[in-house]
Image: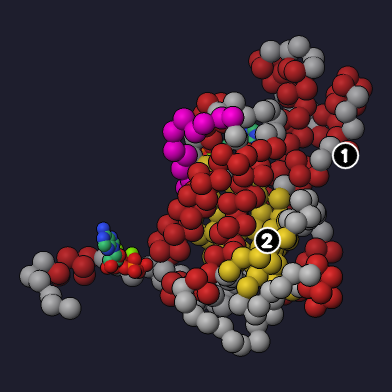
């Protein structure tokens, strides 16, 4: 391409490669969602529609980017783990952060009417995004444990807080005062003795957050569900809905035909524990 006398400005663009051979952790978070959730009248403490919409957008991101092997969501945030060998966009940081954040955001907006059929969007929501590199498996385990522990702490607090208001007739100020300095055990006790709520029996989605991971489809399953899946396609299955959607994978969309023996995978949504060893021990490929 002919170079103009102006083209030198391109040299001011600095390369921003991410260290090779390290786990990439991409996290996004809704911008001012305290206000956004107010304006769109989210149910408190947990609006299920909003959580399902977040899951949907996260799944769309995972479908487009096969190098994402695990995702975890709570409230207005989602974390995505990219395999450490990924060469996505030559590991250019701003390219990855900006494309993944905008894909998530556009999916959120595109799918909004499915989850909020009676609530028109009042203004366009936005998300911030960042990547943190972690060199070791332990860091990744601890990262996800950190987010899930956060889910637990916030949800226990919020559930008790809103029970005091919605069922106990307290004002927000009174509820905050009631909870000040309380330990986890005391919040369980307030919920149970005053409101008959057994915290541990609440929906796991609220207590554990959303876990999305890839797994190979056992060949039996393919026959059993009668799904016709070619080697370049991927089945997305939502165990809660029980349905499966056959979807073309990112690379196929870009026109690269893949005749190679690539394992068929699906993205599974669960609300399981990711702090204990069991989740990781039975899914060694996530950290491979
Ligand atoms: P920032 O821009 O710094 O992230 P924020 O207002 O988004 O500010 P967060 O700490 O991210 O603050 O908290 C998000 C807030 O959005 C929560 O505190 C909660 O009020 C609200 N929210 C998000 N998801 C839901 C949901 N599913 N149901 C109810 N409220 C929600
Ligand atoms: P990358 O992902 O690296 O940005 P790209 O394919 O998007 O790759 P760009 O250098 O950003 O490449 O160029 C964008 C291309 O999109 C243009 O070269 C042009 O072909 C096309 N394009 C963008 N806007 C228009 C438009 N308004 N009308 C026609 N073509 C457009
Ligand atoms: Mg924040
Ligand atoms: Mg936020
Ligand atoms: Mg948040
Ligand atoms: Mg471009
Ligand atoms: Mg361009």
The percent position of residue 261, horizontal first and vertical second, equals 66, 87
For the point 81% across and 40% down, the residue is 203
Q: Residues within 10 Å of mark 1 (few under 14, many from 20)?
A: few
Residue carrying label 2: 245
Residue carrying label 1: 200
| Quadrant position of the N terminus in the picture | bottom left
Q: Identify the secondary structure beneath mark 1.
A: helix
The percent position of residue 28, horizontal first and vertical second, equals 53, 50
Q: Is residue 176 above or below residue 105?
A: above
The answer to whether one can see residue 61 in this image is yes
| Residue stretch in magenta | 118-128
Q: Quadrant of residue 117?
A: top right
Which color scheme did the rendering employ for the protein? Answer: secondary structure
Left or right, 105 with respect to 10, comes to right
Q: Is residue 119 magenta?
A: yes
- Judge: label 2 CB < 8 Å from ligand 1: no
Which residue is most to the bottom? 260
Nearer the observer, 41 or 194: 41
Q: Residues within 10 Å of mark 2 (few under 14, many from 20)?
A: few
Nearer the observer, 29 or 217: 217
Q: Quadrant of residue 236?
A: bottom right
The percent position of residue 14, horizontal first and vertical second, equals 29, 67
Q: Is residue 78 magenta?
A: no
Ligand 2's image quarter is bottom left
Q: Is residue 185 above or below residue 286?
A: above
Tell me which numbered mark, 2 or 1, is placed earlier along the sequence. Answer: 1
């Amino acid at each position: 391409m002919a170079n103009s006398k102006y083209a030198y400005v391109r040299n001011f663009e600095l390369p921003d490669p991410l260290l090779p051979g390290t786990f990439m952790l991409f996290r996004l978070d809704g911008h001012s969602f305290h206000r956004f959730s107010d304006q769109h009248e989210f149910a408190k403490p947990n609006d299920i529609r909003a959580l399902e919409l977040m899951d949907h957008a996260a799944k769309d991101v995972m479908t487009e980017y096969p190098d994402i092997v695990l995702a975890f969501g709570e409230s207005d945030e989602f974390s995505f783990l990219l395999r450490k060998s990924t060469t996505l966009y030559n590991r250019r940081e701003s390219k990855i952060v900006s494309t993944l954040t905008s894909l998530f955001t556009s999916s959120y907006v595109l799918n909004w009417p499915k989850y909020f059929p009676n609530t028109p969007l009042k203004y366009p929501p936005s998300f911030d995004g960042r990547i943190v590199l972690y060199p070791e498996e332990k860091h990744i385990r601890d990262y996800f444990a950190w987010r899930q522990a956060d889910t637990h702490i916030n949800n226990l607090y919020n559930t008790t807080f809103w029970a005091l208001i919605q069922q106990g007739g307290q004002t927000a100020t009174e509820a905050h005062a009631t909870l000040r300095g309380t330990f986890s055990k005391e919040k369980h006790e307030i919920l149970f003795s005053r409101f008959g709520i057994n915290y541990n029996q609440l929906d796991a989605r609220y207590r554990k957050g959303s876990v999305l991971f890839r797994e190979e489809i056992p060949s039996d399953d393919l026959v059993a569900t009668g799904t016709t899946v070619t080697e370049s396609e991927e089945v997305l299955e939502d165990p809660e809905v029980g349905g499966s959607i056959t979807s073309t994978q990112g690379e196929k969309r870009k026109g690269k035909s893949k005749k190679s023996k690539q394992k068929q995978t699906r993205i599974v949504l669960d609300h399981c524990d990711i702090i204990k060893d069991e989740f990781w021990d039975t899914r060694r490929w996530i950290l491979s």
